């Protein structure tokens, strides 16, 4: 996908974080810790358990740097939410943007002192394709 931002240098530095990869990695690590082959999320209780485990800051891969003067992290957790799949066979996970509170499948990390934000908060838009007008 091609993105557009008024500051092209900033756009090249953005790191895109995908919720599917994030959850997959988390489940693999959890299965390894619990000595299971795999963990499937098919029940509401399993989905809320995984959401709860991902909400604990020490379990997350999102790490904030601490202020050198106070030692307090700039931000300390990334919220995750889920909804039931329309197929009835599982759940779809989303990040909750720390900037606007929207659910997002992708977050963009553009500053080490700020939490990753959704594309709306980063002011990233999709490139519009030009449509040819035939017959004029």
Image: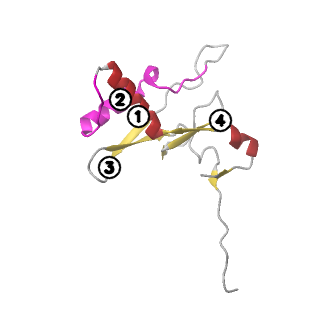
Is residue 32 or residue 14 the one in the foreground?
A: 32
Q: Residue at x 67, y 86 (%)?
A: 135
Tags 2 and 4 touching, CB below 8 Å:
no
Do tag 2 and tag 1 residues touch (Cβ < 8 Å)? no
- Going from the N terminus, do you reach mark 4 or mark 3 first? 3
- Using residue 94 as the reference point, say whether residue 118 is left or right of it: right
**Total residue callouts:** 4
**Which residue range is magenta in the image?**
36-65
For disc 4, the marked residue is: 110
Residue 44 within the magenta-colored segment of the rendering? yes
Label drawn at residue 52: 2
Q: Point out the frontmost of discs 4 and 1.
A: 1
User: Which SS class for mark 2?
Assistant: helix
How crowded is the residue under tag 1: few (<14 C-alpha within 10 Å), some, or many (20+)?
A: few
Q: Position of residue 46 (x, y in %)?
A: 27, 34
The picture places residue 82, in percent across and down from the top left corner, at 37, 41
Q: Which residue is mark 3?
A: 85
- The secondary structure type at the circle numbered 1 is helix
| Sequence-first disc among 4 and 1 | 1
Q: CA distance from mark 2 to mark 1?
A: 16 Å
For residue 116, side relative to residue 95 (left or right): right
Residue under numbered circle 1? 24
Return the x and y of residue 68 as percentages of the image width and height: 67, 14
């Amino acid at each position: 996908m091609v993105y557009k931002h008024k500051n092209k240098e900033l756009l090249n530095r953005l790191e895109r974080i995908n919720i599917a990869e994030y959850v997959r990695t988390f489940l693999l690590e959890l299965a390894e810790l619990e000595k299971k082959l795999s963990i499937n999320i098919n029940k509401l209780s399993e989905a809320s358990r995984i959401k709860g485990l991902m909400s604990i800051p020490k379990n997350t891969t999102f790490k904030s740097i601490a202020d050198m003067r106070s030692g307090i992290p700039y931000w300390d957790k990334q919220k995750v939410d889920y909804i039931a799949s329309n197929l009835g066979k599982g759940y779809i996970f989303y990040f909750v943007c720390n900037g606007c509170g929207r659910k997002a499948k992708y977050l963009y990390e553009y500053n080490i002192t700020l939490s990753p934000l959704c594309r709306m908060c980063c002011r990233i838009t999709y490139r519009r394709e030009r449509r040819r007008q035939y017959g004029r």
